[in-house]
Amino acid sequence: MKRFLAWTLAPLSLSAQAELVGLDDALMEDVTGQTGLTVEIHRQSEISEILYSDKDATSGSIIDIKDIVMGDPTDVHNTQARTVHLIDVDGNDGIVVRSIYDPTRIQIGSISVGDHRGTPVDGYATRQSFGTFIYDFEGTRELKIQGRPYGDTGLTINSSTTITTSDMRWQTNGHTLLIDDLYYNSTLTDMTIDVMDDGSKAYLNFGIPSFSFDFSMGGLCFVESVDCAADGSDSFGSLTGAMAFRNSFVKVYGGGRNGRGITMDSYFELDSTMSNHLSYTDDHGVVIGNISGAVTTSGLTFDVETADPVLRDHIAIQVDSVVGNFKSDSIVIGGLKFGQFEVEFDFSDGMHDLVTYQNKVKLAPGIAWAGAGNQPVVDAGFQTYMNDFYSGVTETSDGISLYAEWNVGLEALYTDNENTVNISNFQSHGRGYASVDMRYDSVKDKNYLAFGIVDYQGSYAIDGLKVGKAANDPKNNAALQGGTELLLPLGIYPAYDFTMNGGVRIYTGGRTGSGLTMEGDILVTDGTFALSTNILNYDDGNDTNDRVVGIWADNVRYEYHFRDYTLDVENQGIKLVQGELWSDMDIGNLRWGDKETGESLGRIRLQRYQTDSTLEIRGAEPAGRDSCVGGTGADAPTCELDGGLWVDKGDQGLIIALKQNWLQENVAEGKRNQLLWENNRSGGVNGTGTQLILDNIHTTDGYNDTDNTFGMQITLEVDVAPTKVVNKANPSQEKIMSLDGTSYTYEDAATLSEGQKARRPIGFAVSSQFQVKELNIDSIQLKHPNIATPETVVHDLSLQNFNITSNLTATPIQ
Amino acid sequence: MIFKQGLVLSSLLCASAWAMEPIGEEELGNVSGQNGVYLSGDIAFNELTGPLVSTDAGNQPADTGQAIPVWGTCAEKEAGTVQRCGARIAVSTNNTDGYFVLDEMRGKMSFEGLTLKAREIVGSGSTPDDFGGDEVAFDGKTVLEIGLPNEVRFDQFELTIANSSHERPTEMGYQQQNIFGVEIDGAIEMQGNLLVFPTGTP
Amino acid sequence: MDVRVLITLSLFCMSPAAFALQDLTEEEMVEVTGEGIALVYEDYQFNAKGNELGGTTDLTFRITGITESNGNDVVVGLSHLYIAGPGTNLGSDLDGRVVNLGRLNNPYSIDMIDGNTLGYGTPAGNADGWKDKAVLSIAAPTHVIDGSGYHCTDANATEGSGTCSSRPKVGNFGDFSYYHGERADIGIRLNNDFDGAGTARDMNVNFHGQSVHFDGSYLRMWGGQADVDSNGSDDQTMMMEAQINVYADKLIINSCNFDGTGCGNNIEYDQFRLELALGDAKYHQPATFDVNSSGNFVFKVQPLPSPGDSRVDSSVPGATDTWTQGEIDPYGRRTDPGTDPATYDWYADYYANGRKSNFSVDNMMVGGENFGASRITNMQIQYLEVTSHDL
């Protein structure tokens, strides 16, 4: 959601700047007329303030942009930047403007809103702004403006733009986020601009039959220097991409959601005949190729509003709906194929528990929670982390505070060698506050992006899975199935309600070279997440019959702390190194049945403490992975003879490799690996019941209590593939899907034809390995509430030399 | 009980109409939702080796006081150059010396159709579950159902039950008394479901 | 490895007070209902049938590593192990014979119990061994006393006829009204191959139980201080109390050839009932398990505390006793001079209410001849030590 908004906002703000620059040219520049139709502009200008107001009698406020400077990037205040416009009028092409921009800087000192603007009385001492934005660029543009033939109104525009050696900077409180070395090339063909009328309202219509661009970003880093490489600073990595749109349009209406403002409708469709792709390169690359899709936006409004209880005056952006789809036929990470991915989304208003959730974001300048006493109030055990997080900024610091609210439904599909898994009917809604700003870490001597989360209340749920051959379109034809239990080992739950608070610090640079480094402290409260769900009476024609029963972790308080997490793209995959993590997941009630009233097993609390654990996601090797599941054999015939199932895994698939070093307890810092079960609580209050405690769980290398480098190693290789399902009531029969994949029959397993074998149900083929040299539980204790110290029942339990391998097929039950 | 006798009577009247068959999946589909997962395949313990290897520091005769390295691959164990290749669980029930041990665990199990799902007990309606009448009071109660595979095949599955002086067999002074070993090879039939649910005071 | 088990029993007491066979006393039956994880097997059958019986499954299931006194290997092969519904005809007719183990309203359970709900206090109101203990319990379905129970060993018992919660089958197999109940047919066939080559000394022995269940069984574990290795000082240890109940309508033992043919006469025990109590936490007699530095184990039921032990009640000096030394006590016995009345009460309470083991068989039949009934009741273990020695 946030990412989506960021992408939507980016072009908007860019075009806004462009508009302003255009207006100012004629008024304020040092303009030199040249011979013929050439205009050369030597630009070196400063604008002290621009105000935008959508204020009327009942609503609205003011956006205040101060200290706008344009000039040469080397010395924006004192050196002119040169622009040459060659203007021609052509019988075919209309007005043609060919422009050459020499290196130019546009610098916006600060943008503020309404009651955040401060006052000249104290020299703007209390002003809060979104920060300083600096845009450097050079390039060329050809713009053709044509009238319409036959006296038709409106204009047709063709243009091509190339921008090179461009940088963008965002600074708050003197610390910079630098988007380095941008290149951008676009071609706009036959765009029409018309004033039209839909019967009730006039609007400006931009028809965009063809628009394409390609771009590259050399690096993204958090430094004040000239470029990301200049002081050897690590970068996030580089991005390149190309997109082509067709048959698209934008309609712009006057008037916002409240009073004055701007409203837009738009439609953008990727031209699938062109090569649309995005690539990210760290040390190795992620390529999202063959992208297609379209998005329809209705009622995108832009208003300046007042009096949010937390943000006060703010910019409000809201949509009635954003509906579309996005598909990539080729995802390649570190040189290996992951398969295809598609998502269909619908952001529209929705009602949940009698509350309407809309899709909107409010932006206010400054950090709403900075300054003594302003920190968000969370629970006592976590407050210190929130106070620390906001201690580095003040009431007058620059930054972005925002409120986001969303309601979305989506369908996600993953296809691996012609077999598809559909995560069906993902529904999510929520609302909450956040802050974003750049800061400096004196210990690491590095800038970081500080991302604060305040009272984010969110919820998501999925109905289940649909699987089948891609050709049979399982999303629309296959029956809904279970199987989300398979995702639990990855920490993905089929439903989750939560309230989140916390702070995350993001640094650029990975463990090796470019990449990302993250640290943070997150607290989830009032959490309820599902371990397994079952929607009863689903699709019986009456939605009110639908009930979700399952096994739920309810009344969850989950504290998660992480340090030095690095994310790098490596050869064949993505690697997350977890420098240090300690967490405390306290499940107040593990419930059966209804998520809030179901019978409870009591309290389960899991504390974790690890260093240098890793999570790797890799593409599968293209060859040699086929396996004999449930038997032995090097090929299909010998495997089947042994009673196994030969699984042809194709050349796509996913490998997830985990290595976890569980540490000995750190008593001084209160960090440990411990599992606790408590029941017989008085009034359900934690700590009043009897407890079973598995204490100080840790790994070692097997020969002493100190060496701990091997940890626990788990590898999962996952493919979507045909599986074998036996009729439990009659084990001599196998389940075979119909030709169109919508129904099934049980057939005699001994006499299956090759055609029938090809229609075995689609599921997951999972090859896994679990290894531990030694896993210790120092003690198993029982504690009665009347005594302070638990009594030890098992003094030492160790698992040595475990290497468990499995080849399983997992089929969601239909 | 009156309910049961009623059923007995009705079954006498129309006994031929009823076949003793488990309810098919199709019929259940109308009553309950769709969830859960069906697992088939194999799980092997230390099929060729464990992660502790014969060249490890700490594993050599000088470290252990024993004649040959303790841990190694199963091929090395066959050849007699190491002592063991299986997995080991050691438990101590008090703070004195000594451990109860499950030792040298190895082998492979394969199965078809182990299922896992959340299920609601059906105690009323046309096709109730049969728990001898207990289902009526449990109508609508959710249980975790682990459906047992019809058959579990064991391939050279073995373990030893023992008592040991030390947690690790590489520790100096290690002594162990093996009590007996278990070897399973071949197929064992297991039918039915294991139902798991909470009870009592949380 | 050749391990011999040496059992030391001391102060083994069989109370002659009540020879009449009776169901468990009410106090013993008032189980704490489950608090934790309930487990019920539904429509269950387990069947491991070996090669030699011509089973459809190609199975070898062996116990190895045992040697007899001459140093020869003894391989114990399980040629058949089954848990199934009633009516299997000694395991020969398993098709469709399934059974439930545990009931939805009285399941097998893994619980954690507050020890203060298990202890009843002592006659003097002092702490007993359960006080302030968190107790991990693994328990079978319980006995019930509300009239909903069934006779424990009668395969045709009806509701209200006894205290067992597990029910026998209802109706006839194959009928629509048939319900298989919660009492299983359980059997095991053992082939003892004395030197691995098959000699005259090899033997087969088979046990078949019909309508078997384990109601009232449990294993409870908690932590505390006790001398587990008999070195005179207390150790921090796991403590256990177990109740092992086995009820069967019939228990049949016979011996056949390894392939199941040529069976001798059956030994049949009718209405088999075993109620074995190991450990008694209330009277500070937990069971403990220890492995010593030579790798041998010591299993103990800790000795009953002696008079004068702080855990045994004694009179508070100066307190007013309701009876004095030398008087007739409430049990009709004259106290010895010098006996502390509170201590006397404590031991009297132990003998009256401490955990006791029972065993009974209504009829023992061998080859059709009835050997009559056999009963051992109210057996109390005051001390038990089982150790293994390397011979």
Image (cartoon, coloured by chain):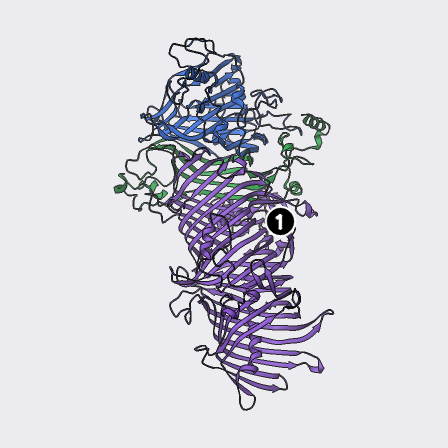
Which chain is depicted green? B
Which chain is depicted blue? C
Q: Camera-side residue: A555 or A424?
A: A555
What's the residue type where badge 1 is placed?
Leu
The quarter of the picture where the N terminus of chain A appears is: bottom right
Chain holding disc 1 = A
Residue A79 can be seen, yes or no? yes
Question: Is C50 positioned to the left or the right of B174 in the image?
Answer: right
Which chain is depicted purple? A
Q: Camera-side residue: B99 or C349?
A: C349
Residue B50 can be seen, yes or no? no
The x, y position of residue C159, in whole percent, is 62, 22
Is residue A596 positioned above or below B123 on the image?
A: below
Q: Residue at x 40, y 69 (%)?
A: A229
The x, y position of residue A11, in whole percent, is 56, 69
> On the image, numbered disc 1 is attached to which residue?
A480
